[in-house]
Image (tube, rainbow, N blue to C red):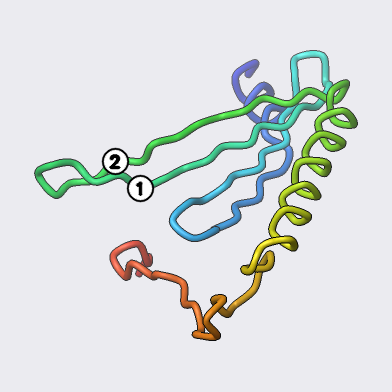
Amino acid sequence: MDGIENSDREEIFSKAVRAGKRTYFFDVKSTKGNDYYLTVTESKKRFNDDGTFRYEKHKLFLYKEDFEKFLEGLNEAIDKIKTLKADSPDEFNDNESHTGEKKFTNIDFEDLER
């Protein structure tokens, strides 16, 4: 019975975000003391030499006492990128290159699930 209670308590919320060739998973989980933390997992599909594939995953654990400082740092880094890109010929999230040609996202149809 303890295993059932523990598994019910552990995962509270999960959100998957597909972004290009990566998928990000945001999972809110519970500790034994009924406190919450966030895991952010980046998953990328990697191909082996024989044509088979595997998923490479990187995970970050973020605890509630760090949320505010983490968010401040993340927002500051994103704002800096936007500022730097605004000063360059290619603006942040611009769909046209500096030559006026349209840019397109490279889609790998093997990555699409059926």
Q: Is residue 34 above or below residue 15?
A: above
Residue 105 location, x and y as percent? 46, 72
Circle 2 is placed at which residue position?
Answer: 54
Q: Which mark is residue 90?
A: none
Residue 55: % across, % down: 36, 41
x%, y% of residue 82?
75, 56
Q: Nearer the viewer, residue 10 or 16?
A: 16
Does 38 sit above or below residue 76? Answer: above
Most foreground residue, 30 or 38: 38
Which amino acid, by three-letter code, is at mark 1? Answer: Lys
- Badge 2 element: strand
How many numbered tags mark residues here?
2
In this rendering, would 87 be left or right of 18? right
The residue that disc 1 covers is 45
Q: Residue at x 51, y 84 (%)?
A: 102
**Residue at 64% across, 73% down:** 94
User: Circle 1 sits in a helix, a strand or a loop, which is it?
Assistant: strand
Q: Where residue 68 sits: x, y (%)?
A: 90, 31
Q: CA distance from mark 1 to mark 2?
A: 6 Å
- 1 and 2 marks in contact (CB < 8 Å): yes
Looking at the picture, does residue 108 appear above or below residue 14?
Answer: below
**Residue 48 placement: quadrant:** top left
For the residue carrying disc 2, how many other residues have a C-alpha within 10 Å: few (<14), some (14-19), or many (20+)? Answer: few
Name the residue rendered at 14%, 49% in the picture: 51
The mark that comes first in sequence, 1 or 2, is 1
User: Nearest the camera: 78 or 5?
Assistant: 78
- Residue drawn 48% across the image and 51% down it: 22
